[in-house]
Image: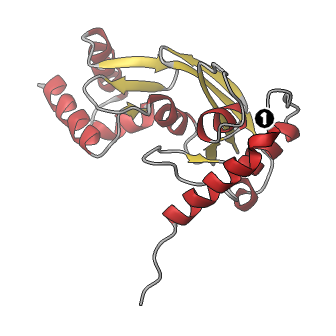
Amino acid sequence: MRQMLFRRALDAAAKRGIAVQSPQTLRALMPGESAASRNGTVRQAVREGLLERLCRGAFLYRYAQTKWILEETALRLRPGHICYLSLERALSEDWGLIEQMALGGITVMTTGRSQTFETPYGRIEFTHTTRPAVHALEGAVRRGDCPLLVASPAHALRDLRRVGRNLDLVQWDALDDAMAAWAEARKAEALPCPA
């Protein structure tokens, strides 16, 4: 009976677009349960294939539909911290300034601590930033339905320099096109002015 109620709670969360759960969010799905009972329910869900352990602190609900597993996992691993896609991931996949780069994961700037997580779906590399929150997010845009913001090309390049990463693969001649794409993304996410 407990497992059936847990499955319903996971289904309801999935309908709200939450495919990846943390221990804290799983705890919220089982109010009133003791820690031992919750842990037993989660272990059984993993054994039965209902949940997949992605890494320490993150579980994927197997029946949820999402293409943003790594991005959702990043949010669950750094709750309460600013996180945005930047560095090689943003420059390669979003802005086309680095070609032919097989990242095998995502690179995330965060106000939390630096750490790398290996998951069955790829690597999540967190890099700490000491910049104030308002500056950390300047120029970041929402790209489609991705749950994480994406740094602008200029911001991602600044982050790359700031953390001492290699700039040799950057295609500087494509920077104008990338900035134009970023400007279009900013325009698309701007709310219309009320009449």
* Residue at position x 85%, y 35% in the image: 163
> Which image quadrant is residue 165 in?
top right
Residue 137 percent location from the top left of the image = 67, 55
Residue 95 percent location from the top left of the image = 64, 42
Front residue (pair 157, 163): 157
Left or right position of 36 against 119: left
> Which image quadrant is residue 107 in?
top right
* Residue at position x 74%, y 42% in the image: 174
Residue 147 percent location from the top left of the image = 47, 45
Left or right position of 59 against 40: right
Colour mapping used in the image: secondary structure
> Which image quadrant is residue 129 in?
top right
Instruction: Identify the residue at the far left of this view.
Output: 1
Front residue (pair 41, 163): 163
Left or right position of 160 against 45: right
Does the rendering let one see residue 152?
no
Assess disc 1: are there few (<14), some (14-19) or many (≥20) residues with their C-alpha within 10 Å of its C-alpha: few
Front residue (pair 23, 59): 59
Q: Secondary structure at mark 1?
A: loop
Q: Which residue is mark 1?
A: 171
The C terminus lies in which quarter of the figure? bottom left
Instruction: Identify the residue at the far top of this view.
Output: 47
Front residue (pair 174, 26): 174
Left or right position of 149 against 155: left
Residue 71 percent location from the top left of the image = 51, 35
